[in-house]
């Protein structure tokens, strides 16, 4: 039994005339008659009474018509827009992001995406770089916005932004008035650091930037989120090194001072490898790239 046979029967049950039903279905009458015979054979009951000059429904045909009147609209509704989902015009896209992307690049990218794909629902997930890579591999994430992730066959990468490193200090700190500080000046103070197993690329970058005086590194605390690190800085617990976009959310009590280093922290969008990402994911990455250029 085929779905089209049920649709043919439903139209004929409304018209009770093979010619008009065939016209509505954009087909000739003989194939329509053949398909309805096949449907009756498969069901094992007659649906149509063809003994008179006009077509009439049998008791089984009337019952099937009533059932299809309930089922077919629901089926049509369920199937509507599947092509748009495939094209990335409908559905949902799961987006992971590091906290430093949440107040600059992500909002601008989202605005562009919502304008371009108004029927796609973004699901936003604040996650560390390592968490995003893991969830992308598990199929739980469509797009990740990660920081300083190394090239890998596990995901496809799109470069978004390269940023200077700054050290965040209390407003009344001795380094707060400087236009730029050296690595040695930074490591002369206790630091608020971040766990390497959750953001290996960024932690390694900070260590490389502070390499000239690395033997003097002292960590007062290690935290997962930069907001927590900034809270500890404000409390006088130590200094923390972050990408320059942290300036966008600094409270008045903290100042960000550039570090004298050529190294840059890189924000990257990652998706499934080998072009296997969804159309919606690819469209969102395009919006992120456009926002980064803007």
Image (spheres, helix red, strand yellow):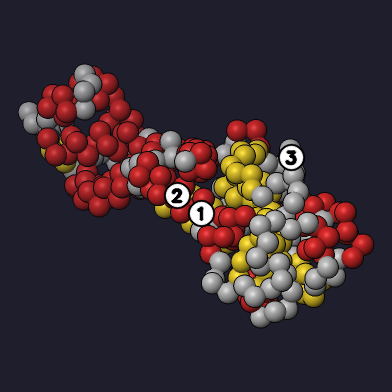
- Sort mark 2 into few (<14), some (14-19) or many (20+) by Cα contacts within 10 Å: some
Q: Position of residue 279 (x, y in %)?
A: 49, 37
Residue 201 visible in the snapshot: no
Residue depicted at 73% across the width and 78% down the height: 237
Residue depicted at 54% across the width and 52% down the height: 95
Q: Is residue 25 left or right of residue 221?
A: left
Q: Position of residue 206 (x, y in %)?
A: 77, 56
Residue depicted at 61% across the width and 66% down the height: 255
Numbered disc in front, either 3 or 1: 1
Q: Position of residue 262 (x, y in %)?
A: 74, 44
Please say if the residues under marks 2 and 1 sit with CB atoms less than 8 Å apart: yes
3 or 1: tag closer to the N-terminus: 1
Please say if the residues under marks 3 and 1 sit with CB atoms less than 8 Å apart: no
Say which element carries label 2: helix
Q: Position of residue 152 (x, y in %)?
A: 74, 40
Location of mark 1 (residue): 104
Q: Residue furthest right?
A: 215
Q: Which mark is residue 151?
A: 3
Q: CA distance from mark 3 to mark 1?
A: 24 Å
Q: Which mark is residue 108?
A: 2
Q: Is residue 205 left or right of residue 216?
A: left
Say which element carries label 1: loop
């Amino acid at each position: 039994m085929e779905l089209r046979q049920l649709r043919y029967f439903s139209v004929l049950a409304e018209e009770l005339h093979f010619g008009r039903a065939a016209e509505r279905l954009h087909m000739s009458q003989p194939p329509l008659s053949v398909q309805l015979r096949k449907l009756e054979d498969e069901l094992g009951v007659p649906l149509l009474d063809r003994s008179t000059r006009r077509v009439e429904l049998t008791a089984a045909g009337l019952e099937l018509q009533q059932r299809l009147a309930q089922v077919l609209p629901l089926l049509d509704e369920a199937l509507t827009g599947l092509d748009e989902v495939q094209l990335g015009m409908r559905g949902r896209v799961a987006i992971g992001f590091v906290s430093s992307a949440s107040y600059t690049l992500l909002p601008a990218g989202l605005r562009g995406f919502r304008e371009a794909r108004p029927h796609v629902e973004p699901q936003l997930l604040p996650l560390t770089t390592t968490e995003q890579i893991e969830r992308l591999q598990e199929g739980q994430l469509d797009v990740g916005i990660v920081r300083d992730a190394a090239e890998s066959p596990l995901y496809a990468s799109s470069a978004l932004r390269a940023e200077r490193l700054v050290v965040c200090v209390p407003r009344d700190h001795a380094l707060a008035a400087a236009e730029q500080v050296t690595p040695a000046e930074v490591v002369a103070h206790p630091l608020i650091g971040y766990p390497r197993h959750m953001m290996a690329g960024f932690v390694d970058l900070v260590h490389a930037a502070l390499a000239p005086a690395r033997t003097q590194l002292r960590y007062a605390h290690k935290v997962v989120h930069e907001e927590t690190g900034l809270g500890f800085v404000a409390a006088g617990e130590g200094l923390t090194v972050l990408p320059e976009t942290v300036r966008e959310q600094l409270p008045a009590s903290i100042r960000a001072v550039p570090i004298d280093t050529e190294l840059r922290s890189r924000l990257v969008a990652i998706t499934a490898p080998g072009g296997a990402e969804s159309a919606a994911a690819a469209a969102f990455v395009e919006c992120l790239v456009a926002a980064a250029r803007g």
